[in-house]
Image (cartoon, grey):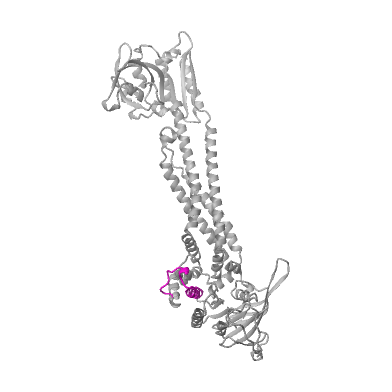
């Protein structure tokens, strides 16, 4: 008991008295742990930002897209039948997130005249599938599907063209060709790039009800591609998607004679990027730790040489070899553990204060949790480095003869 | 049974050129509890080696060393270390105070290796010991802020704080002026006699050696008893094997400070 307490007291005294040396050692190790933990966290955020960016473009992982075309002059069934088949399949396989999607052109009356804008006719779940988050207002709700007038979620360019600053005035816009209807703008999404033209989202059912027959240009991209029905986007769990995709495709095709049903998914390999990022992180962290560890060993060795006389004097007091060894080791380990903690705290502070939008070119919707595993790895590495750095001087300290040490 | 008993002890080391250097040759010495023994001799005659062997910092090459009747060669390294801390107090010429630590922390340091009450009450014990050596008002003073005499008093307090059975003083006045050295030796003598500890002093200073009850001279590794009067005159010299001091030949030594020079014998 007294031995352990004595060793701890001794180690603490050493740290207290050699503050500058300890501080120098701490800085190196703390930087290394900060690097390991911070880089790991930053990589996790980068991967998440990349994944979310990817999901905004291509849908969640794994999103399966179904498209159907009539293959004969008089196929059985129509888009409404197809829609019903899709709905039936989704229910059968318990799929929660799915959305119809169709790119269309819609005439919108702006103060400077009528323009055809690109619109995406979707279901409410589309925002989940594509991570669409309005910067102002809101996304569609189920209530909007029952509304007596169409609702729109537009981009900022649309709002600017309309001469409106924000949604505080509950702006509306007349859309449609021959018989225009007044649509209420309920949400605004960020422009994807500068000088982007006005675009809008509209609920698919509302589009069908209010606008499908009213487009002046008739510019329905799907129709132009002889695709009478919208695409169906389905978010399915990774791993099951191949089988599920094939099953749904086969089911729908079987119930729609004369139609061809195609499907594809966005499950392409991103492992190379993830793997590279991980190796970069490990490399940076490992190198930082190596530098920190070398600095620590260097300082520890110099210190022990400097302290040999002191160690000799202590041994004349009755400090056993094991006590001296343990003391020097403990001193090193205590220092590095403290340094590790400081490093983790600094890493947390940095990670929590990263200007995410500026660094990653867009916000991160699902911020990955702070990588505590990385913090633990950093701490463990710091402790190991401390033990290793202490081992060399401790061995050195024990091997010096007491009388030589006192006269050193 | 003596407290310390060396019988025909030798200490040799092998030099890099493979020759053997005999530092101590057949040293026989017995020290009883409460006794004050002084050892004089020129530099390089093996005084410190003898002190290190006595203090369990070094081991004899041959011969027997009994510590309270126990052969130290049979003790494990750990036991030797523990007994060194418990039974011996060292006072060095250069004080060897731990840098960066106050007087109190220096005196506390040996108690970190003690057990029980000594360990848990270390600060109080250290303060009491500093009080005893007249430094009760300098507890928190750093060694470099103390005079040489005060530093040696801190070192004495540190050597005595665990209540050793033997105080081994290696040139305790070597770095002090005559007056301060005298004060330090007064203190050592006083505390040693109060605590009943044996005091073995290695010194160049014949006046310091003369304070001891017995004096020895180390010459080329051999220990011979001598007799010094209070005027620091060497009055006797016989080999240790010959216990009869009356056969001594009177010689005269140089004054302190020139003792590194060859000893000049003065005819009676």
Q: Is residue B76 left or right of residue B144?
A: right
* Extreme residue toward the top, this view: A73
- Residue A55 vs A400, above or below: the answer is above
Report x, y in % for residue B258.
Answer: 60, 79
Q: Residue at x 47, y 39 (%)?
A: A42
Q: Residue at x 44, y 78 (%)?
A: B132
Q: Tell me where residue A172 sits by quadrant.
A: top left
Report x, y in % for residue A22.
Answer: 49, 56
- Residue B152 on the magenta segment: yes
Residue A60 can be seen in this image: no
Residue nearer the viewer, A24 or B234? B234
Q: Tell me where residue A196 sits by quadrant.
A: top left
Residue nearer the viewer, B165 or B232? B232
Numbered label tally: 0
- Residue A230 on the magenta segment: no
- Residue A366 vs A156, above or below: the answer is below
The C terminus of chain A: image quadrant: bottom right
Residue A138 can be seen in this image: yes
Report x, y in % for residue A376.
Answer: 49, 47
* Extreme residue toward the left, this view: A169
The magenta-colored residue range is: B135-162
Report x, y in % for residue A90.
Answer: 42, 24
Q: Is residue B225 left or right of residue A154?
A: right
């Amino acid at each position: 008991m007294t031995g352990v307490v004595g060793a701890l007291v001794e180690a603490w005294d050493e740290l207290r008295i050699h503050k500058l040396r300890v501080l120098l050692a701490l800085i190196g190790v703390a930087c290394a742990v900060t690097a390991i933990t911070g880089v790991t966290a930053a990589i996790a955020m980068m991967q998440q930002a990349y994944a979310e960016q990817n999901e905004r473009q291509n849908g969640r992982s794994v999103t399966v897209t179904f498209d159907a075309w009539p293959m004969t002059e008089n196929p059985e069934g129509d888009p409404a039948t197809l829609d019903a088949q899709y709905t039936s399949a989704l229910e059968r396989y318990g799929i929660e997130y799915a959305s119809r999607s169709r790119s269309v052109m819609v005439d919108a009356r702006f103060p400077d005249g009528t323009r055809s804008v690109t619109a995406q006719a979707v279901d409410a779940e589309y925002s989940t599938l594509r991570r669409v988050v309005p910067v102002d207002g809101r996304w569609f709700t189920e209530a909007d599907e029952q509304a007596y007038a169409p609702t729109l979620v537009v981009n900022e360019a649309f709002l600017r063209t309309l001469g409106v600053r924000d949604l505080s005035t509950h702006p509306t816009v007349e859309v449609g060709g021959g018989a225009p209807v007044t649509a209420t703008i309920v949400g605004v999404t960020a422009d994807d790039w500068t000088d982007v033209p006005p675009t809008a989202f509209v609920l698919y059912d509302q589009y069908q009800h209010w606008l499908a027959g009213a487009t002046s240009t008739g510019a329905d991209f799907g129709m132009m591609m002889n695709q009478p029905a919208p695409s169906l986007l389905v978010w399915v769990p990774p791993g099951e998607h191949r089988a599920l995709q094939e099953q749904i495709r086969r089911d729908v095709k079987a119930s729609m004679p004369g139609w061809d049903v195609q499907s594809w998914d966005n499950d392409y390999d991103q492992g190379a990027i993830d793997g590279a990022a991980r190796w970069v992180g490990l490399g940076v962290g490992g190198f930082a730790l190596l530098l920190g560890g070398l600095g620590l060993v260097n300082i520890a060795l110099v210190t022990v040489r400097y302290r040999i006389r002191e160690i000799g004097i202590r041994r004349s007091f009755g400090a056993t070899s094991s006590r001296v060894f343990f003391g020097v080791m403990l001193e090193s380990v205590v220092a590095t553990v403290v340094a590790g903690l400081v490093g983790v705290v600094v890493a947390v502070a940095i990670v929590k204060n990263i200007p995410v939008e500026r660094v990653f070119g867009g916000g991160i919707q699902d911020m990955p949790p702070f990588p505590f595993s990385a913090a633990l790895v950093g701490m463990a590495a710091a402790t190991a480095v401390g033990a290793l750095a202490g081992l060399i001087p401790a061995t050195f300290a024990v091997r010096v003869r007491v009388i030589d040490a006192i006269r050193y | 049974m003596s407290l310390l008993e060396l019988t025909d002890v030798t200490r040799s080391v092998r030099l890099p050129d493979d020759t053997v250097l005999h530092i101590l040759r057949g040293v026989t010495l017995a020290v009883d509890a409460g006794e004050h023994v002084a050892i004089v001799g020129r530099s390089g005659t093996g005084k410190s080696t003898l002190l290190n062997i006595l203090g369990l910092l070094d081991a004899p090459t041959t011969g027997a060393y009994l510590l309270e009747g126990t052969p130290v060669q049979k003790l494990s390294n750990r036991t030797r270390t523990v007994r060194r801390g418990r039974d011996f107090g060292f006072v060095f010429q250069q004080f060897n105070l731990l840098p960066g630590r106050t007087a109190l922390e220096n005196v506390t340091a040996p108690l970190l290796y003690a057990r029980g009450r000594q360990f848990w009450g270390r600060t109080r014990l250290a303060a009491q010991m500093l009080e005893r050596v007249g430094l009760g008002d300098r507890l928190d003073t750093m060694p470099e802020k103390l005079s040489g005499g005060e530093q040696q008093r801190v070192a004495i307090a540190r050597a005595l704080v665990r209540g050793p059975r033997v105080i081994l003083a290696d040139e305790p006045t070597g770095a002090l002026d005559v007056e301060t050295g005298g004060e330090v030796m007064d203190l050592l003598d006083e505390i040693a006699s109060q605590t009943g500890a044996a005091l073995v002093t290695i010194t160049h200073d014949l006046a310091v050696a003369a304070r001891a009850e017995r004096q020895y001279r180390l010459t080329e590794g051999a220990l011979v008893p001598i007799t010094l009067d209070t005027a620091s005159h060497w009055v006797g010299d016989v080999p240790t094997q010959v216990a009869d001091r009356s056969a001594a030949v009177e010689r005269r030594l140089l004054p302190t400070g020139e003792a590194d020079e060859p000893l000049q014998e003065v005819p009676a």
